[in-house]
Amino acid sequence: MFRPRRDTGAALAGIWLALILGFLYLPIAVMVVMAFNESVLYELPFKPTTVWFERLAENERLLRASANSVGLALANTVIATALGTMAALAFARYTFRGKTLLRLLLFPPITIPWLIIGTAMLVMFFWIGIGRGLHAMLLGHVALSLPYVVVVVGARLASFGPSLEEAAATLGANPWQTFRRVTLPVLAPGVVAAALFAFAVSFDQFVISYFLAPPGVSTLPVEIYSAIRKGFTPEVNAISSIIIIISMGVVLLFARLYRFGGAPADGGGR
Amino acid sequence: MLRARRRTWAVLGLTGPAYLWLAVAIFLPLSAMLYFSFLTVAPFGGREATATLKHYQAFLDRDFYQVLTWRSLQLGLHVTFWCIVIGYPAALALARHVPGRWREALLLMVVLPFWSNALVRVFSWTMVLREGGLLDSAVRVIVPGMESLDLLFTYDAIVIGLVHSFLPYMILTCYVSLQAIDGALIEAARTLGASGWVIFRRIILPLSVPGLFAGVILTFVPVIGSFMEARILGGRAGTLLGTVIEDQFTVVFNWPRGAALSFILLAIVLLILAVAWPGLRRHLPQG
């Protein structure tokens, strides 16, 4: 009795999901295709060329901005992952007063719109003499990445209790040995995932960098934004295509390695 | 005693650096901005600043700011509405009608664009929506002789771009609570003779409200603070509270005015979060 209805349901579900994937990927596909089109004005018919990628290789501004973005993201990843992992360890392994308050303080950087945080940083950094520049952006990016690192590493820590560490201590390991030989190896997948998160937060970050970029220094998103506002050029398509393909490739690789982003295939509801 | 002291030092040493960093980069700047919003001018370059309420007064006096605030809220409502209308059925389809192996792959595909640069995704829409762009060409192939369709630099373009940006959030949060619903509940209801509509209305919808709620907050709050999407896709039609705040800091250089407007925006956000908190807290992971 229920068979036919369930089949139409599944068919409708399939159509709806296909439409949504089309909506999500269509503009991105168009942009990548246009990076290989000869017309500066994005006009059809499509004439294949790699001239925009060659131009990109000579575009000093975009190349310097790319180098800034990568360097900034790497520095951010190291600092945010280290500080965030430490805080997550304290939350998971100690009970202390003010813990709830400290946890709550992780929310503002995530929930307050970046426009407000970015302008506030501009005001403060200018006022006390930190000024604008890559160092100011690093300050901002680490602050935005920290809550994610604490949450991701904390989730991993919650998945195994302190019993392993206690066993190591009972067997005569000192705290440092326990940390290096026991805690760190078990924690590693969480730390790697958190580092990936931190890198993505910084590499994609536009708003904070935009307000903290002095004239002449920029990151890739800031440079792309000014290029878009000055007038579109297929070089922006070329660099955007490279970014999209690399970032999606990295996520796919991680999804293969860690199977995150979904419940186990046999678990959950039907 | 000694152990207790060592614990205190351990906790301080582990949490101190992270929270010191957050203090310097988030909480002190927010306080500094609150202070600035009460000054006549920014106290740089030897200018004398005195305390004033005029920037908040300006918000109340000038219809301009209130109209823009209302527009930003309206944009938030429109984008959230479309995200629910498109995203909730998608999450339902994923959780209920797609077999396990496919489900994981599809979910990954939905979330994947969200990992690519937000700016790049907004930019990609300009190529679809402009006159002579993909949408225009497609419509003209289907309906020959129709006048050209130029959606770029309209309010609709902003809505489309923002829905595209936030749809993955909505699908993900709804999916998480939908897939947690016990299948036995639905079987039981069906055995007892409930129709598909009744099952949806009485079981599925109520149990997925927390996810829906989280999706609404994760969409609405960032959207009312957006400015880049409106600049790129909205052009002149894209003046919002967010773009006016951006202008105060990057074009007009009236920082105290910008700070006051930022704080009004923050007050709106906090108000929304305060109203949403009881519902949100139930949904947060414990611990």
Image (tube, rainbow, N blue to C red):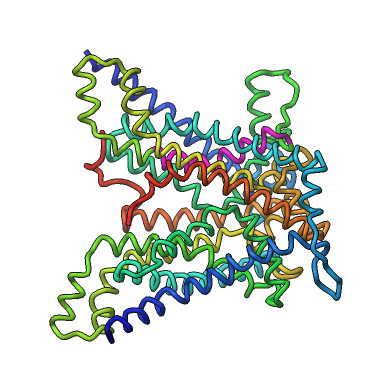
User: In the image, which residues are magenta?
Assistant: B154-174
Q: Where is residue A104 in the image (x, y as percent from the top left)?
A: 45, 59
Residue B29 sits in quarter: bottom right
- Left or right for A216, reference A141: right
Query: Does A258 lie within the magenta span?
Result: no
User: Which quadrant, please, contains the N terminus of chain B?
Assistant: bottom left
B220 lies above or below B49: above
Q: In the rendering, at what x and y percent does residue A5 appear? A: 30, 16
The secondary structure making up most of the magenta span is: helix
Point 38% across, 40% down: residue:
B106
In the image, A115 versus B22, the foreground residue is B22
Q: Is residue A17 above or below residue A50?
A: above
Q: In which quarter of the image is residue B279?
A: top left
Q: Where is residue B102 in the image (x, y as percent from the top left)?
A: 32, 38
Residue lying at 64% horizontally and 63% vertically, measured from the top left = A209
Along the horizontal axis of the image, is A13 left or right of B136?
left
Which of B256 and B88 lies nearest the eye of the viewer?
B256
Residue closest to the far right: B47
**Residue toward you, A222 or B170:** B170
